[in-house]
Image: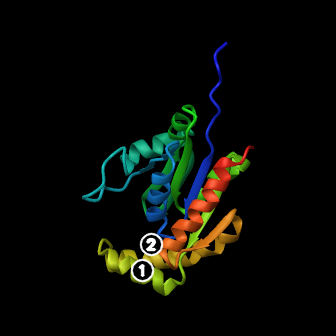
Amino acid sequence: MEKKVKKGKLVIFSAPSGSGKTTLVHYIMTQFSNLEFSVSATNRKARPDERDGVDYYFLSTEIFREKVAKGEFVEWEEVYDNQFYGTLRSEIERIRDKGNSVIFDVDVKGGLSIKKIYGDEALAIFIRPPSIAVLESRLRHRSTESEESIIKRIARASYELGFENKFDIVLINDELEKSKSSSLAVVTDFLNKNN
């Protein structure tokens, strides 16, 4: 009789843009051999340092909309005007079917959608910046955003902070090493717990 592989769990990191979630996700991934990154899909153009299938699945707007219509996303959103992001169901199942757990770096609404679908199989972590002023400073230091983009991201961040109480855990990213340690502790606890 063939042994059934136990499906992996889901670890969701969500935060306003510039809160440091991507840095924390990359750190957590180095700590677990059975934790794989869920690559999101988007219709936006790749930045110079981004690769298709590694950072995102870069899709045309037409293909993105087709996949939405076919129900191929567990979550998707028009984050900015005509700029879509989403998580493909096939990406999650590809990882879980191997027995590995999935880690997500997704926007706030996306994180809550995944949590709603997967329930106790998922841990939803909200990374909160110490303040909107600190967030704005981080976005400006990136030097990857136009002034218009920064203004949009700050407005969106203010809105997204209103959802933090819907997450399982809220971590304030005021000091990176402390945030890494806190994130590692909650993820380790969740992955080691039996459902």
Residue 44 in picture, x, y percent from top left: 36, 56
- Per the model, the C-alpha gap separating discs 2 and 1 is 13 Å
Residue 174 showing in the rendered view: yes
Kind of residue at badge 1: Ile
In percent of width and height, residue 146 lies at: 31, 76
**Which quadrant is the C terminus positioned in?**
top right
Q: Nearer the viewer, mark 2 or mark 1?
A: 2
Reply above or below: 6 against 134. Answer: above
Residue drawn where x is 67% and y is 48% of the image: 192
Q: Residue furthest bottom?
A: 133
The residue wearing badge 1 is: 151
Q: Which mark is residue 18?
A: 2
Q: Residue at x 53, y 61 (%)?
A: 107
- Furthest-left residue in this view: 48
* Residue 35, percent from left and from top: 52, 45
Camera-side residue: 39 or 41?
Answer: 39
Q: Secondary structure under badge 2?
A: loop
